[in-house]
Image (cartoon, helix red, strand yellow):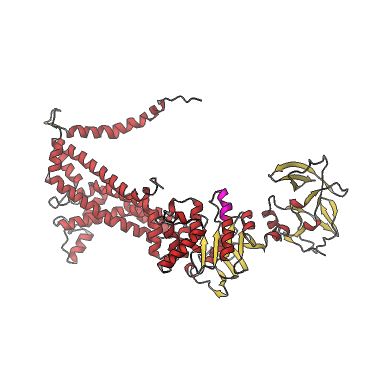
Amino acid sequence: MARIDLKNISHSYVAAPNTENNFALKTLNMSWQDGGAYALLGPSGCGKTTLLNIISGLLHPTHGAVLFDGDDITNRPPEKRNIAQVFQFPVVYDTMTVFQNLAFPLRNRNVPGKEIKQRVNRIAEMLELTESLPRRARDLSADAKQKISLGRGLVRTDVAAILFDEPLTVIDPQLKWSLRSQLKHLHAEFRHTMIYVTHDQTEALTFADQVIVMSEGEVVQASSPQALYERPVHTFVGRFIGSPGMNILPCEIDGAFLILADHRIPMDHIEPAAPETARLEFGVRPEFVHFSDEDDALPVSVSAIEDAGRYKIARLLFKELPIAAILPEDAPPLSATPKIKFDPENSHIYADGYLMEKGE
Amino acid sequence: MRKTLNHKALWLASPALLLVAFTALIPLLTVVNYSVQDTFGDNKFFWVGAEWYKEILLSERFHAAFFRQVAFSAAILAIEIPLGLAIALAMPKKGWGVSVCLVLMALPLLIPWNVVGTIWQIFARVDIGLLGHTLAGFGFDYNYTQDPVAAWITLIVMDVWHWTSLVVLLCYAGLVAIPQAYYQAARIDGASRWAVFRHIELPKLNRVLLIAVLLRFMDSFMIYTEPFVVTGGGPGNTTTFLSVDLVQMAIGQFDLGPAAAMSVVYFLIILGLSWLFYTVMTREDTDAEGRLP
């Protein structure tokens, strides 16, 4: 078991990086508690796999240090670190049986045969692979192969952290759910530190206690799924998380008034002290856009209603500004002249993309 | 809805069939035709049945040539396959070295057979050849025109020089196709270099190696031009392989019947051995569920 600290880590794939843009991973500091479940979330190319490979030792960071339980292990090769890694595409050793696959990391570490057998049988049982043990690994389905990849990490008693690099990408949708819940179960059982890389927000939000959202080589926000949802610290997080993402509208502020497309909306609790030159934006999640009959509500026109199953998405236009709102499945039909209000508690102002703290 | 079944579409295959008939089937059947008849010229033929086949199969000369042929193929396979694999493993996987290596590797493959023969014929000559003269200068008793061992070594080294590249290129293509995740997983699993080769690279190269073995076997078993140019089958007939022998019989002695029978036997041997290689090397793949992966 291990606590993982990253100190001033940055990485460049260019031999002699000189500008900021050469870095796939810009300087970051991070601490991961022993036994936590973390997700690295971000679009393709944001540096999340790079970060993962630095932790596992497959990559040596250009700058900075990786600490396991306070020990600097930056220069240790992957096999000398107490980590296991599961890759996007299931890796199994073709010529070996499932048993031999699971035993492989133990054999390489000269564990006695009797102990290997015990460990492998125990893990196979947990992963529901017992019946497949004598079969050739290559003949199994993708999800079973992915379980073997995971199993090769679990059999080792020295493993402190398990890293996942988009492990469910090639798994059928129905099986994704069962594998993911099995993962949560295993986490509860073994308390390994787990770090899970994905670009799928549902996977990240359901798996992790803490989600680290990355964009262009930088950590944008690291917080609980709930905080990501309720208080995105950057418009990127607001847009990236949620389906549909947050409404981000250009705005101005005049005292206690929010000005959206020349329309003044009183919002007493918004008193940001933004520099005058900052580009201001107003952000509100579609869940917090409510229809209202009150006089000061904003009149909007409806451009489309999308049915998303358990709820509906209303695509609205306030003057030229597109706004999405979530309607419950059984919501009554909208009036001919619908009007909306924003939930003040969940309305945010962003200056140059960053969340501004609310005045009390 | 009932489907109307007819086989008119098969006519679309007729141009291809016609082409194959003229390029392969008809010449082959002509050979079969010669092999069961005797002729004394004048385009008159007499039916002799399986006589030529009996003569060939029982002939000492054929046995000797066949044995030499098998020995030659076995020798070059035993050298070229491991050597090619080793070179492919040692080649750089990225950077400027890749294209340099690939071009160097491809060079011997671009040289025509008879030119390769000529190059080595001159290169290995004791009087003027760089190799032969140098070896002689160091005191080695090397003369491929007189010494059978030297002749064999020359032919084998020449074939290795000419064709190892093919094995290298095939293996290299197979190696770079292995996803990085396999190597990364193996590192994390603490696998040694040998274990990576044994459990990742070799199984993934299985198919490629099969193709390499088949190609090199068939090619070397039919080798004609190079030994014809370098040794002409000698000294004596110590490097008279099946093809050299066949040409001597057909064109040198003009024994059309026996030569035709030998051609058919030769063809069947290559076919049979290729089938054997294929079956042995793919057997492991099919036994689990009776299907190829």
Dividing the picture into quadrants, the one containing residue B143 is bottom left
Dividing the picture into quadrants, the one containing residue B205 is bottom left
Number of numbered markers: 0
Is A163 situated left or right of B138 in this image?
Answer: right
Q: Does the magenta-highlighted stretch encompass residue A172?
A: yes
Q: Can residue A282 be seen in this view?
A: yes
Measured as percent of width and height from the top left, residue B19 is found at 33, 32
Residue in the foreground of this view, choosing between B237 and A257: A257
Dividing the picture into quadrants, the one containing residue A109 is bottom left
In the picture as drawn, the residue positioned furthest to the bottom comes out as: A71
Q: Can residue A22 be seen in this view?
A: no
- Report the magenta stretch's main SS: helix
Residue in the foreground of this view, choosing between A99 and A69: A99
What residue is shown at x 28% (from left), y 35% (from top)? B24
Measured as percent of width and height from the top left, residue B209 is found at 34, 52
Measured as percent of width and height from the top left, residue A15 is found at 52, 65
What residue is shown at x 57% (from left), y 52% (from top)? A176
Q: Does the magenta-highlighted stretch encompass residue B242?
A: no
Residue in the foreground of this view, choosing between A55 and B217: A55
Segment tinted magenta in the rendering: A170-179
Q: In this view, does B140 lie above or below A90?
A: below
Is B118 situated left or right of B13 in this image?
Answer: left
Is B265 situated left or right of A200 in this image?
Answer: left
Measured as percent of width and height from the top left, residue A343 is found at 80, 54
